[in-house]
Amino acid sequence: MPTNKESPEEGESRKAKLNPQVGSLHCPNCGGDALPDCVRCTWCGSSLASVSCPDCFGVMFVGMKHCPWCGAEASREVLIEKVPGKCPRCQMEMFAIKIGSSRLNECQNCGGLWVRKDTFQEICDDHQEQEAVLGTEESKTVIAPMKISDHDRMYIPCPECGDLMNRVNFAGCSGIVIDWCKEHGSWFDKDELRQIVTFIQRGGLKRSREREKERMQEESRRLHQEELRLAAERNRVSYGESGYSRVWDSDRGAFLDFLSEFWRGLGK
């Protein structure tokens, strides 16, 4: 925070050095410069941005009419209803919101989102349809995996049941690690839901399915080869036993005759 002795010109110069790429976005409370995806003002702590885009679920700055990520028109409604549980990251109260047709629970302190499993399935299905219609399933663009910090590796509790959630790499290859409760839903840290939607729209789920199909085919081939090996082993053992039996059957009479002659010779 600027000191009382700092002039306005010095304060503006210092802010510009800290945020060189920011030009026109300002906190509506203190006027400080800010990035369009900041949750809170770094100067006065006021709430600045929240998830408002119905297309990509991107964070939008207060006062924006269109999403800075995809250009879609803002659509956000704060619902008046009780939200179960608290933010698993910072233990603050969450608020129910409606983005487009999707109902989510948002922490306005850290920008995280709690999405129930049925809602998340609908989001994935909707954007898979967009992928097919737009033809983006053929895109070879790959989203760079996020760098996971030590803090992000901590297991956090489900806001609804309180059990620690699993940490999973979405689709197995996205590089976006989310916190997942099998029974209730998923927790997304700030900007993770937008990254997942972008991953889907760029054909990520299709590539994931193709990899899984290849893996299953390879496993099927491996099992088939193992079955052939076991069958050959059984045939070898069976042949060895039956061959021994045939040899014994053919020589048994001669062997008994030999024993008879041998005992008769001893009796003389």
Image (tube, helix red, strand yellow):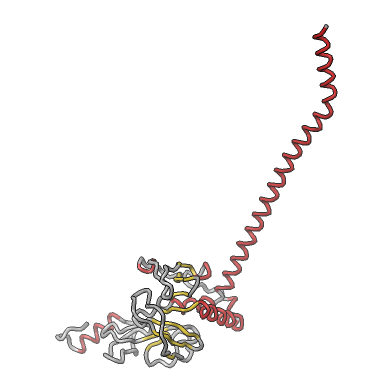
Q: Nearer the viewer, residue 68 or 224?
A: 224
> At 63% from the left edge and 59% from the top edge, which residue is drawn?
218
Residue 78 in view: no
Find the residue positioned furthest to the front.
267
Quadrant of the image containing the C terminus? top right
Left/right placement of residue 207 relative to residue 180 reads right
How many numbered marks appear?
0
Look at the picture and state if 261 lies above or below 148.
above
Residue 50 in view: yes
Measured from the top left, where is residue 6 in percent x and y?
17, 85
> At 83% from the left edge and 29% from the top edge, which residue is drawn?
249
Q: Nearer the viewer, residue 194 or 3?
A: 194
Residue 238, image quadrant: top right
Quadrant of the image containing the N terminus? bottom left
Left/right placement of residue 5 relative to residue 120 reads left
Left/right placement of residue 36 relative to residue 253 reads left
Residue 26, image quadrant: bottom left
Measured from the top left, where is residue 198 in percent x and y?
50, 78
Find the residue positioned furthest to the left.
5
Measured from the top left, where is residue 139 in percent x and y?
57, 76
Look at the picture and state if 38 lies above or below 170.
below
Measured from the top left, where is residue 75 in percent x and y?
46, 91
Q: Nearer the viewer, residue 171 or 79?
A: 79
Find the residue positioned furthest to the top.
268
Residue 130, image quadrant: bottom right
